[in-house]
Structure formats: structure tokens, C-alpha cells
Image (spheres, grey):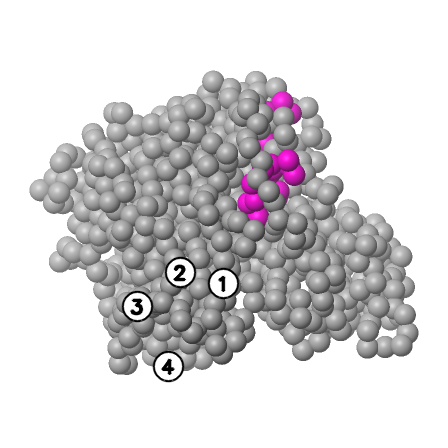
Amino acid sequence: MKTVLRWGSWSLVAIIAITVLGAGGIYWRLQRALPQVKGELTLTNLSSQVNIARDARGIAHIFASNRHDVFYALGVAHAQDRMFQMDMSRRFGSGRLSELIGKRTLKTDAQMRTLGLRRAAEASWDYLDEPVQASMTAYAQGINAIITDKSYVPPAEYLFLGAKPEPWVPADTLTVFKVLAYSLAGDALEEPGQQRLKEILGEERLAQFLPPYPEDAPIALRQQDMSSVYPAVVKELDKAEAPALGSSMGEKIKGSNNWVVDGTMSTSGMPLLANDPHLALTAPGIWYYARLNTPDMMVVGVTLPGSPYVTLGRNRNIAWGFTNTGPDTSDLKRVKTDGLKTTTISETIRVKGGADVVVDIAFAMGGTVLDPKWFSAVGEMANEDENVILYTTLDDEDDTTPAIGYDNIDTNSFEQLDRNLNRFKMPQQNMVFADVNGNIGFIAPARVPVRDEQGNWVSEIPYEGLPRTLNPGRHYVATANNKIVPDSYPYHITDQWYGFHRIRRIVENIEARPQHTIESFKAMQMDTVSDLARRMLPLIAATQPETQSGQQLRDILVSWDGNLTPGRPEGLVYSGWLRAFSKLVYADDLGEDFDRFWTPRRGFMERVVRGSNALWCDDIGTTAIETCQILAGTAFDTAATRLLDTYGNDPQKWRWGDAHEAVFAHPLFGEVPVLKNFFSVRVPVGGDGSTPNVAHYSYKAGTFDAPWGPSMRAIYDLSDMNASLYMSAPGQSGQVLSKHYRDMADSWAKGEYMQIRDDWTPDAPPPGAQVLTLKPQ
């Protein structure tokens, strides 16, 4: 979730905060909010004693005698460490931020009410089986045991807001899952942007500007890989003949990496699996590490605060990891207003410091009518006599996706996993798998619509027809949001595959050595070599900047290997040049709309330097004929002016990491003067949006700050599960004065890892552990 407050609106809050800080009152208040992490707590609704052992990093190892109590205790740990984050997530998905924050979030609330994530979450409860419902109920009981206690002091954010958290209910957990699905889903609201680009460029040039997936880029599954699971040919559907177009906003930042190799490609003779999901970097981070133990279960990995399950991780027999598939699961349809039959509901948004706002939500033709008052894209897309209807899987009421977290606790084989994932509805994920018997596999589960020739949703891809493989012949599977199926696959998933620069480098590294180790997997996850940069180097070497400073920057890159390491200047020089070069290439073509569509369009720019889009280098505003070589030289001159002014006159002393910091922004105070330095976390990093170790930055922002990157890293060794490695950032705790609020950020940036072993016990806890014993009342 993006920062929800803008600093200008909060200047008064900042002034008040500084005054209180000067008096020392806030520090005392924040200290009181720190949770009890050792000793004993007596709590209601607990059936037996539970131990929560937090190790030296604050990782929670929970030991309970039954499943009710282990989920209950995770609720306790989440409430102690992440309550404000959980509250913001449920409020965002429910359209209730304005109750806490005021009118600044009214539009966001109205959009969420319209999309109906909360309504769908509440309706999905009846589709879950009893064990799943019981686990969510136990989890809610654990949260409420903490936040409803008379001695409870809420986290710092509530002090500024003058509020406290409400009791938790299971529908809140289902809403948190919906928010995650929303953040990863395809965005139909990009369609007006694509329409506008078509108006500017025409159909032929639009296809060049939004190029399809490159023919030479790796595809996750080959036809023979899928036939290992499908001995019979799936009936082929008629596919639309329209040209495939990329996203109107360029390569998406909703990305991740995962790969798995079988025992023939590891020195141990057993599989290795790696996963690093790329999400918004926030303080606290999106994930919370935990290990859950009862006599009949053990599961360890990252949990999603607000939910009782390990989302990404392992049990004693299998390990799994996700990347986002990015399917086309939402559409906008323009319809004539005259004669349109609608049904309407009304919901009231309470606004802190203001009057309540009633939002009328209309439904028609099986979808949701979008009000242009809240959705600006509608006004751009539709005429005055038209409505725009949204169709999306996000509002499906029979969503049983959260049940997979419970199912994975007991999953021991690919076949069992395959059966369970029939309950996974959204968002579609590329799930890699490995087990202790030496098997590896891949499944991409989800509900993906099937459309007729008019674009109407007529069915969904049958579960048995979704992409999957078991023990593929090339001995590995790797995904990076790239294309996952060959052209022979009979169903349409999306045209907007991306991540091809990352997957090229990942496959190159996998195939570069006959056998891998944990150490080689660590190096692959931290790899900051850019496939795109290497493809740019011949053009860079051929340029002739006109200024001495431009030539100086060009010379720095002539012998460069494309590695955007944080400790050297090349990454900054290249990034400054590429930003300037991109603007020179297509600003003239987009005219006054350029700023709207200025993003790192890596696929397009690759085609520019390879020649297929070379005509874009000619400036349509001049009579001269400009070549890409000329523009690339000019870009060095332009970049030199800005970089020298910002970073000093000696480029050899520049460091990419000094300019390029991962920014873990606080959702409330990320842009508030003074407070942002207290609540947000920054750390130097290498890479960019094209490297396996991703660190996206925005062209429009004017800086190289990276607000998106690897939200966690994990490497699983199936020969010895306790040798598996983990890391996330900035820290386990959401309590700003906790020593675990930011203590993992430097380790994350440097490529350091930690173990979370399953042989630690209550009698022999992790080194440096603090043990909190929960006792039933």
C-alpha cells in the first residue's frame, strides 16, 4: 500500500510532533508500547501453555501442543509486533482509512468500496472448510487477547492519530488476503492509457512502443515439460488474432524471481530452490518470519501479518516459492447508459474531522459500474452517454485461496500439492516446488477467464489445463514474471509477459555451471549484472558526445561489464545516461503526454538499440535525420550536466549506492518531514529494474531511490532443510523503538542470510532467544 499521506497536509502534525519530542514525552510513550517478549502472560481462549521464543533477529519460534493454540500464538506475536500494519491493511481493503486519517484518503476508500474486496471477503467465509475457519478464529482470538487487554499500549502511530485498534474478526484476515491479491492483479485501468497511446501513435507504432515478449527470451515451460503431466493433448481453443501488446506503463514492477534445480544439478544430489518476491519496500516489511510447531506439524517461512499461515516457506518434506504470473483477469467495457439496467447499493464512509460520505455502487451486466467521480480513467475512456463496467475476479465470492496456507502444512508430495491448489483462485502465481524425495515441479494455479471473440467472459481455464510440470527433462524451472508457456499452449493467460532481462540472466547463471550449491544460489540472488546494459554497450562505445564531461562519462562505460554494483560509479553513469537517452528517443513522439508515459521501457529501448525500432531516434520536430548514435552521445552530454551538479565534479568518486538507496517507506509518515527520517529506513543497494537483484527506481521521481525490491529472500536445501537460508528487511518488528525495527536492513542489502532451524526446541531455543510463555486463564 502506498504512502497515504502527503507531507504538505501534515506539516502541522510534524511541528506538534517535534514539540512533543523536545519534551521527551513521545519517547516515554513509545517505550511503553514495546511488547512483552519474555516472562509469562496469562490469556483467555488458550487451551494449553505455549512458548514463543524470539531469536536474536526477533524471529518467532512458536511451540504449542495443538493447532488452535499455535495459530492463536501467531496472532499474539503479530499483534505485538505488527498491529498498525495489520490494521491499515484491513482498513485499506475495507475502504475505511478515512475513519483514521480524514478526507485525504476518501477517494481511495470510495474506490475500495466500489471494488468490493470486503464484501467478497465476508462472503467467502462460507466456502471455507471447518479446519480453515477454526484456524482463523483462533488467530483472531490471539490478536484480541493482546489488543483488548486493559494494559495494552498501542503502537506509536495510534498516538499521532488519537485512535486505537478495533478487535479483529476472521473477515479481517480474508480482507488482508484480498488486499494482497489486489496488489498483484492485472490492472484493467491501464486500458485507457493504451487507448490514448493508440490515438497518439497509431496502431503500427503502438505495437512498436508496446512490444510483445521477445522471441529469444526464455520461456519457463517447454511443450515436452508440460506433456510430462499431460499425456493427452488438451483441446485447443481459437485464439484472437489481435497483436500482442505490452503494458501501457512499460515493464511492470510487480515482479519476483524463483528457480529450482533437481539433484543432477546440485552438488548434494538433491534439489535446491530459491525465491525472492519483489514488492513495495515498506517499514515494516510486508512479511513476518515465523516457525510454527505442534506435535503433528512444523512449518517455517514468511507469514503475512493479518493471516495465520506461512505464505512462502517449507514444512519438513517440501519447499515452495511464488512469482506473479500477471494474468489478464480484469476488463473494462463501455456500454450505453440509455436502457442500462442497474442495481445499486449504498455504503457510508466515515471521515475523521468531516461529514460522512455516502457512496452509491451500481452493478450491471454482471460487473461493477465505475463512477468517474472516483475513477478518473473512466472519464478519459467513455463518452458522456456511456458507462464503464469493470469485470474482475477480485470480487468473486467463492475465493478459497487462503485455505492453501493451511493445506501446505500437511503437503508431502507434488500430487498432493496439485490436488490442494485447486482451491487457489487468485492471484495467479508461478509456484515452484521441491521435496525431500528429489522431485521438483511447477504449477500456475488460479482462476483465469476464457473469453469469446467479443471479449465476453464465458468460462475459465479448467484447473487441469493450467500450466504445470513435474521433473522436467532439462532439470530446472525458472521464472521471473516472464512468459511461462510456449505458443502451443491452448489458452490465453496474458499478452503482457515481462521480466525477460532478469530471466535471461537467471537462465544464463543456472546453465553456466553443471552443479549448484547454496553459495552459487546466493550469488544468483544478489546478481546486479544487467542483461539490458550489456546489450546497450556496443551503442555506448560508438557514441561521440560533444562535451568533455559527456566524453568522460562515456569513457567510464566503454570497458564496463554491465554490473551495477553499489560500490562503483558505472551504475550511476549508466542509469543517468539511459534516463536521458530514453527521453530523447520518444519525448518528441508523445508530445504533451510524455510525462504520463515516461517509464523505463526496457523492451522498447532494447529494440531501439538493436535496430528494429531505430527510426524512433529521429526527432520528428526537426528537419535533420538523427540516428541513435547521435542521440546516445547527446544523452551523455545531458546526463553529465545533471550528474556533475548533483554528485560532484569527479565521476570516479561517485558510487551507485550513494545515489541509489532502497527506501522502506512508512505508509503513514513516509513523506512527512522529520517523521519520515524516524519511521522510514534507507540503505544503499546496487542493481536496477533489469537485474536479478532488483531495485526499481522511477524516471518521473527525479531521483534514483528504489521503493521496490526483494521483499524477502529464501534458499531451500532439500538435502538438509536446516541448512536453508532466509532474509528480509528492514526488520521483524513494526514498533519503531524496537531493536528489531531496522536491524536486518544492512544484512539484506549486503546479501547476508540467516538460518531458521527446526531442531531448536523450548528446552534448547535459538541462540540469544527471549522466551515468552503464554498460559491459559
Most common SS among magenta residues: loop
| Residue at which label 4 appears | 12
- Of the 4 image quadrants, the one containing the N terminus is bottom left
307 relative to 97, above or below: above
Q: Quick one: 639 or 262, which is closer to the camera?
A: 262
| Residue at which label 1 appears | 333
Residue 308 picture location, percent across and down: 30, 42
Gap between marks 1 and 3 measured at Cα: 18 Å
Q: Earlier in the sequence, mark 1 or mark 4?
A: 4
| Residue at which label 3 appears | 344
- Of the 4 image quadrants, the one containing the C terminus is top left
Residue type at mark 4 is Leu
Residue type at mark 3 is Thr
318 relative to 202, above or below: above
Q: Earlier in the sequence, mark 1 or mark 2?
A: 1
At x 27%, y 70%, the residue is 346
In the rendered structure, find residue 155 and report the number of the disc placed on it. Answer: none
Would residue 160 be found to the left or right of residue 215 on screen?
left
Q: Nearer the viewer, mark 1 or mark 4?
A: 1
At x 74%, y 71%, the residue is 589
In the rendered structure, find residue 365 and report the number of the disc placed on it. Answer: 2
**Magenta span of residues:** 472-494
Residue 713 picture location, percent across and down: 50, 41
Q: Nearer the viewer, mark 2 or mark 3?
A: 2
